[in-house]
Image (spheres, rainbow, N blue to C red):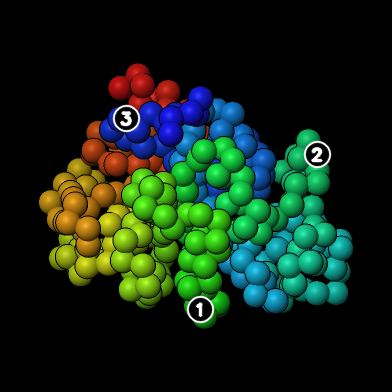
Amino acid sequence: APTAHAAPDTDRTQVIAHRGASAYAPENTLAAIDKADDLGFRWVENDVQRTKDGQLVVIHDDSLNRTTNVEEVFPGRAPWKVKDFTAAEIAQLDAGSWFSPRYAGAHVPTLKQYMNRVSRNHQKLVLEIKNPALYPGIERETLKVLGNEGWLGPAHVRSKLVVQSFSADSLRTVHALRPDIKTGFLGTPSVAELPAYAQFADQINSSHTTISLGYVTAIHALEGPHRKPLEISTWTVDTAADARRVAGFGVDGIITNKPDVVQEALNEG
Ligand code: G3P
Ligand code: CA
């Protein structure tokens, strides 16, 4: 049902807050998706990985030390890989102070906590399965959490969820498990290779430095697994000039750390 947060879904180019509004709040925390919400953005992107004890958590790097105080809390545990820490250990870490003292006490959210907040904010999610080769079985586990949190019903699958990955194998697995879920391949396959990707991916999500009008046109000329034109969301676009450039190519989505900057550029045309 429409809410005070109703999304501007009629806009041609969807703006997606990369790791949340991560230029303004610590990436992949609940504060970062709240910030996107405060700025009026419905779509957020995240990165999902797995702890030693099999919990799914939202964090970009495969190690904890760039975005938490793990080196202080667990000094003897280099190289501080996510997969070598339990969820209880990770829950003790401060994932906000590295960004700004204002965010001291922010945590690395579990996927369950994250989904609760995305739901509460009436947001939509591009969920990235990160480093799946490190986490065999993470696709099925991710879908289990999404299902438990009410995100695999028809309304969510139709318009609120995309699962993306740099791993074609991971996306093929997701597509085989739940063919109704929209998927996005991260990368820039050659135009000749695109039809093979269109068997299991609804989107080709490429770095903005790798695309052209011709490439975007080639993507749109194909149909994805749901018999709709293949789409492209491009990343990570943080300047008005780049936003205007890729909007001129006709991209469907722009993934950005600065959603306000990109939206303003789009509004100005
Ligand atoms: O959503 C696209 C982008 O997130 C892919 O790169 O390294 O930021 O996960 P990365
Ligand atoms: Ca990502």
For this orientation, the residue located farthest to the left is 221
Decide which of tag 3 and tag 1 comes sooner along the chain. 3
According to the image, label 1 marks what residue? Answer: 137
- Give the spatial CA distance, label 3 vs label 1: 36 Å
Mark closest to the chain's N terminus, 3 or 2? 3
Residue 79 at least partly seen: no
The three-letter amino acid code for the residue at tag 3 is Asp
Q: Position of residue 179 (x, y in %)?
A: 31, 66
Q: Which residue in the structure is indicated by mark 2?
A: 101
Is residue 78 shown left or right of residue 176? right
Q: CA distance from mark 1 to mark 2?
A: 37 Å
Q: Is residue 3 visible?
A: yes
- In the rendered structure, the answer to whether residue 243 lies left or right of residue 222 reads right
Q: Amino acid at mark 1?
A: Gly
Considering only vertical position in the picture, is 2 above or below 255? above
Residue drawn 38% across and 41% down? 254
Q: Position of residue 109 (x, y in %)?
A: 67, 55
Q: Residues within 10 Å of mark 1 (few under 14, many from 20)?
A: few
Residue placed furthest toward the top: 268
Residue at image x 55%, y 28%? 39
Image coords of residue 59 (percent x, y): 62, 58
